[in-house]
Amino acid sequence: MGVADPQPPLLEVRHLSTHYVTDEGVFRAVDDLSFRVMKGESMGLVGESGCGKTTAMLSLLRLLPAAGRIVSGEVLLEGRDLMALDEAEMRALRWDRLSMIFQGAMNALNPVRSVGDQIGEALVIHGLAPGLGAAAPRVGELLEMVGIPRSREAHFPHQYSGGMRQRAMIAMALACSPQVVIADEPTTALDVMIQAQILELLERLQRELGLAVILVTHDLSVVAELCHSVLVMYGGALAEYSNVDRIFNDPRHPYTRLLLSAFPDLSRPEGKLISIPGHPPRLNDLPPGCRFAPRCPQAFDRCRLESPSPRLVEPGHWVACHLYEEAALDAAG
Amino acid sequence: MRALTRNRLGVVGSVMLALAILTAVMAPWIAPYDPEASTEVSIEDIYARPTAAHWLGTDDGGKDVFSAFIYGSRVSLIVGFAASLISMIIGGIVGLVAGFYGGRLGNLLMRLTDIFLVIPDLPLMIVIVAIVGPSLWNIILVIGLLGWTGTARIVRAQALSLRERQFVTRARAIGAGNLHILRRHILPLVLPLMVANTVLVISLSILSESTLSFLGLGDPTTLSWGGMLNFAFTRGAISAGAWWALVAPGLGIVWVVLSCTLVGNTLEEAFNPRLQSHHLQGEEKMVVRPAQAQAAER
Amino acid sequence: MPPADVPPRRASPPEEDFILEVEGLHKEFPLPRGLTGTLRRRPRKAVHAVDGISFDLRRGEILALVGESGCGKTTTALTLMGLITADEGTIRFNGQDVTHLGERAGDRPRASIAQVNGRMYRKEPSVFPAITMKRLRRQMQMVFQDPYESLNPRATVLESVAEPLEVHAVTRSREEKLARVRQALEDAGLSPAEAFMSRRPHELSGGQRQRVVIAGALVLEPVLLIADEPVSMLDVSIRAEILNLLDELRARRGISILYITHDLATAAYFTDRIAVMYLGRIAEIGPTRRVLAHPQHPYTRALLSVIPVPNPRMRRQRIILGGETPNPVDLPGGCRFHPRCPLAFDDCARTDPPLILVGAEHQAACLLADPG
């Protein structure tokens, strides 16, 4: 899966399924999701609003809201299954080995505490510093790493601009030197130029620190710039998963193809933009059969009856679509 | 409506309130005796214990307590509802004007609200009723004129936030004037919260009326539950051991106030999105392992 | 065909058929001073949201106003719609000066100052007092960014779309109102219209909601549509249909559109001309294809170079500007872009470059721009 590599993956997710149990039925937010991320590699998790990508990431960290239930699957971090741990073990691991930059978090900073203190808090909780005072040198180091002058450590969130707050969130996520960082829509609310700065920063940090990054976004263009592998999600399930080159130049799943044509490409302004008629399914009311069938221009009978599971159509390229049969039997699948 | 049925307490409160209203409306048919009618009484009839003929016994005048209790609900509820209506109207207007128009007028209105909030309601009510005389209307007016401040604050906050919303800007872009915006956009969205708050005000109004009557400032031509309590205290029910004369009106007040509070709280929670809780918890249930799951859920 | 209540335009050659002409528009928002500031008589600071912009919009043209947050594009839109009053400058609609119109007949005309030859003059009220802002709104409508917020959550689609008709009292009967609403909904692509009329916003998807807003903007049959980020909050897979709809409205009904966005890529897709704004001024303006192919302003070049492109094989030289867009309160002296400009030289700190012609209808405000 992903980039063919003899090394064991740093993070491997196998058949993860997460549901939300609510008054309005069971939302099958994540359904049989599998992928792997190598050390130093970045994976783009792409999908539109409501497709379950944030839920999938929260499941990795076991930070779901009250109604969430991880019903099956394994999440192996260096071979150790996070789902089998108890809460105390998970808490030790959370942030220390696997951290997340939450969507819109730059607006959720505590307004009455200094930014430096909030970053230092992670260090203190994980026992990397006995107190906020002792944490200060490391906090300064982190701030510089993300391009914020050390002198601004004592400033409050309102004194930081939007781009700087996002950088502070990145610093916070890196505080305990994790191996895997999940960035959930890190540039969505930012201006184009600040977006470019943040993406460049993420790229540099990934290179210098050897991080594995999962970039969650709805913007395929960002993924093209930054990621090695791409997983396209639709309606809570995997639609297509491969390396970035193949996703963009040889997309197989009808949804991936349509999605690509929906993005304006500045390098080819004459291209006609299409839109996909209809709208994504409600996760508590999924159609029988393939989730994309109602909107798929190539749907046929089997699509409406049976939901396709991901199949390997060529080495390192998974597609969940009945148009393709399994190309090769891969024992590592 | 759906909001009420979802919350169990809301259902309980609604049923209680419905029963109370039904009792008041159906009083002439439910009450076995007419409290107004004059009857001949003998000494045995005073503070007589509850019997089949008098379910709640008799009061100091030999009259049936149960009938007085049924009819008493009318006064309490009428005063409660009428006074709250006045409060709702005043509070609504003050809140809307202060929140929507803002500016100096808004500030002035809010300072006025603060003044009314600070003044202790009960002593003021006592003084005013003592001066103008304890007629039913006077009592309704006094309670209504002092009970609008909570509503005003809530309405103002709501109007203020609604004013900035994009559909209001859109209406202005279309060319709508203030009146149109108030009528079409602000009022319909403020009304639910106002109604929820008013139900809570009803409970307060009923309490105020009961207190005034208990202190002897009630309308002498009618008998409310507070009045019944007043008579029980001042006319020797306790020394006579006539618990029935106290318990019934006391419970009646508690019943109605409780029902209004339950309904009002439920409505307010439903209509005010900020009050709804949202938390990250339930760690024990988050990861469901097939074998453990069955054991744990048991 | 111009509506009957707007006076005839001044005589002009057919190729210069302008629906909107904006000259020297200024709008600033004064900041409160605080006690020490007032006591020390410090000069009042202000946010210079729009600091002198001029552009034209031809009949049937789609002009994109592009820029990052804080550049003044939304303030411009609100000023054109009369929701904010301009401090200085002239706005002409169909040749008629509408900068200072009162909201209703009998309203005091709003303050308006024009700068002519360096001196400030107060403008005279409109020659045709019957023209009020309210009447103007029949021809000039706006579409907003957030489809979840632009509609009253308790109003049905019918009520929302019919609202403009009621505000302006243009229909005489319920049947007429229904017919016009039906037509507007169909024009906005919501078909069959009847199926949508009794629905409420929460029953509709984002794209459908936006179409309802557009229908509401079309129901009065305007000639100018100002669309402020109409697709930014929609899923990518449905943005194209809204943009295609706008393009279609222009083609079929000759509506002129001012498309405001921060997303250069969507602006590139369907607009005729593009104006790039920076800190309250227009940095570059010209035909879309030309500006994208041959950007003359360093800011435009930087923007174009960093916008992600869905093509992993394309590795470009990215001009990532350092820092952030400065606060529009303390504007830098000289060219307002010079502190971040990779090509800045001495003169840039002293001279504020005006827009100069650099190609056919293509202007850029840069000292390094090559005229002709």
Image: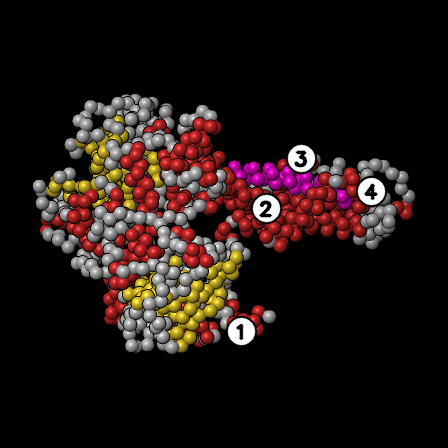
- Magenta-colored span: B68-95
> Where does the image place residue A51, in percent across and percent down from the top left?
40, 57
Q: Establish whether labels 2 and 4 are both on one chain.
A: yes
Image mark 3: chain: B
Which quadrant of the figure has residue A256?
Answer: bottom left
Q: Principal SS element in the magenta part?
A: helix
Q: CA distance from mark 1 to mark 4?
A: 63 Å
Image mark 1: chain: B
**Residue at the spot of label 3:** B137
> Where does the image place residue A302, in percent across and percent down from the top left?
43, 58
Query: Marks 2 and 4: CB-CB under 8 Å?
Result: no
Residue for point 53% across, 48% down: B271
Image mark 2: chain: B
Q: Which mark is residue B32?
A: 4
Q: Secondary structure at mark 2?
A: loop
> Where does the image place residue A277, in percent across and percent down from the top left?
37, 48
Could you tell me the amino acid type at mark 3?
Trp
Relative depth, front residue between A19 and C358: A19
Instruction: Look at the picture and state if A328 lies above or below C70.
Output: below
Q: Earlier in the sequence, mark 2 or mark 1?
A: 2
Q: Which mark is residue B1?
A: 2
Q: CA distance from mark 2 to mark 1?
A: 40 Å
Q: Earlier in the sequence, mark 2 or mark 4?
A: 2
Colouring style: secondary structure
Q: Earlier in the sequence, mark 3 or mark 4?
A: 4
> Mark 1 against mark 4, which lies toward the viewer?
1
> Mark 3 against mark 4, which lies toward the viewer?
4
Query: Is the residue marked by circle 1 packed among few (<14), some (14-19), or many (20+) residues within 10 Å?
Result: few
